[in-house]
Image (spheres, rainbow, N blue to C red):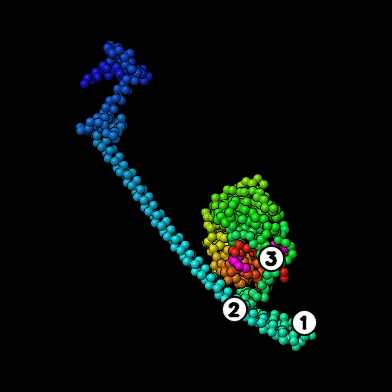
Amino acid sequence: MSSITSAELNYLVFRYLHESGFTHSAFSLGYEAGINKCPIDGNMVPPGALITFVQKGLQFVEMEANLSNSDTDVDDDFSFLQPLDLITKDVHQLRQMIREKKRNLQKEKDKESDKEHELVRARVREKERLERQERQERQERQEKQERQERQEIQERQERQERQERQEKEKEREKEKEREKDKDRLEKDKEREKQHDDHIDTEMTTDQEDVVTVKHDENGVSGGPEPMDVSTSSTFQACEIPSSDVTILEGHTSEVCACAWSPAGSLLASGSGDSTARIWTIADGTCRSSVQNGPSNVLVLKHVKGRTNEKSKDVTTLDWNGDGTLLATGSYDGQARIWSTNGELRSTLSKHKGPIFSLKWNRKGDYLLTGSCDKTAIVWDVKTEEWKQQFEFHAGPTLDVDWRNNVSFATSSTDNMIYVCKIGENRPIKTFSGHQGEVNCVKWDPTGQLLASCSDDITAKIWSMKQEKYLHDLREHAKEIYTIRWSPTGPGTNNPNQPLVLASASFDSTVKLWDVEQGKLLCSLNGHRDPVYSVAFSPNGEYLASGSLDRSMHIWSLKERKIVKTYTGNGGIFEVCWNKEGDKIAACFANNTVCVLDFRM
């Protein structure tokens, strides 16, 4: 290998000094080294030649340091050493430095690999934990479902046994009545023979005796305690006669909803047969009739062709404020708006699950729907388009209720209550406190207080002024299905009467609550099975309740007792008063709707 001469090196240094601007140093070196006598052609030497030469030398030393005697190629982890190291250290020292760097680098790689393995193991452990948890939850749900099924079977058997016992008792009572009637007839005949001139007087006396006997037999004396209202003493005495009942037939499946028009004598009903119906109810008293002809009813079909299609069940309905439009909600997730002549005005489609609740606002420009798809939607009735969808709940939306024309409350199976407002993307108020599904929410007449009831066996009263509930009402023994505010107090047509809340429960009772104190006023214990519906009369003096025991009771709130009762042929899902307060409608599981005259 050829080596560089001193003359060549001096020339490279001379060029470096000259190019770097060290003119005097370059002159001194050129004079002393005789650069002008050097045979090197300066035009052949590129600028920066010395720097290039030194860099290549350093690279060579670095490569030499990275190559061991047995290496034929540069290592994959080839490292560039610092120039100072290359100048000041020999090849042996440089090789030691490189080996140390390689060892440190390998340690770092091993640490990274261990971290990755640990992360993988942690993910596997977490996945196994989640799978175990999911299996456990699945097993718990299955066990809970099996327990509920067993309980339902047992309750059905108990109800059936009770019904059979009641039927037998009724039959025995009827037999006794027939015997008594027979005895009375024989006595009447004897009196007619002996006192032919005083027949009218004797008959009047006899009728008075009958009433007295009936009261004595039913044990009116020795009344119940004020807080626990018993009813067995009044059943026979206040049974609504069949002459005051109109039975509306036509539905082919259970009737689960009914509502009077606020404008007149129209009654709407919704059924599992995929239809709603608008019945025209004549003014005045009923005349013990069964109405099913085409002249008095409009059939609002929710599916073309055959009925009883399960996905088209009419689950809820509501009239607008002036009674000109009827809205229905269905199992197919669609809301529909109908005119009073049965014309389908609008079909509102956006929900992805059954609609459970539906309400008009007071102004009548918006319709609110709550669905199994966990959302609530406000619809603009004029444009027939959805205005806003509210997606806050983690479970199906069970009930909705307007506070005013632009804000409303929603409840869900997720135990939560949200107060929402049109135009707002988040709830303006969140009420959490229930430990079970919240079945119903209702604003009081002023819109200041919100009542709710739940499967956690409590009802609660909330205020927009605070986060926690005002009152926690805990006197029921089973799930509370529904609640209603009385039409009394400020903001109502009966401002001088106190505001009362009624709650209906699966424990077969209806309870009335003092709203200011949050205390129980009384418990109305007249039903034998779950109570599904309660409704206050427009004047706030009476309360109607409907139960799965097939009976509807009308209670006097002043006397806290049953004043009228009616027993049909199926469980009752809903009861409602007309605006005059002289008729009550009840919808039954045996496919009928009954209209009852109420006179006191």
The amino acid beneath tag 3 is Ser
Q: Secondary structure at mark 3?
A: strand
**Residue placed at 60% from the left, 76% from the top?**
170
Please determine whether, in this image, residue 183 is positioned above or below residue 569: below
The location of residue 464, given as percent across then percent down, is: 62, 57
Which corner quadrant holds the C terminus? bottom right
Give the CA distance from mark 2 to mark 3: 28 Å
Which mark is drawn over residue 200? 1
* Whether residue 520 can be seen here: no
Q: Secondary structure at mark 2?
A: helix
Q: Position of residue 212 (x, y in %)?
A: 69, 81
Q: Position of residue 407 (x, y in %)?
A: 63, 53
Residue placed most toward the observer, 136 or 41: 136
Q: Which mark is residue 172?
A: 2
Asked whether disc 3 touches disc 1, contact meaning CB atoms under 8 Å apart, the reply is no
The answer to whether residue 582 is visible is yes
What span is colored magenta in the figure? 568-584
In the rendered image, the residue lying farthest to the bottom is 194
Q: Which mark is residue 289?
A: 3
Report the Cα–Cα distance between label 1 and label 2: 32 Å
Choose the circle earlier in sequence order: 1 or 2: 2
Circle 1 packing at 10 Å, graded few (<14), some (14-19), many (20+), is few
Residue 11 location in percent, x, y?
A: 29, 17
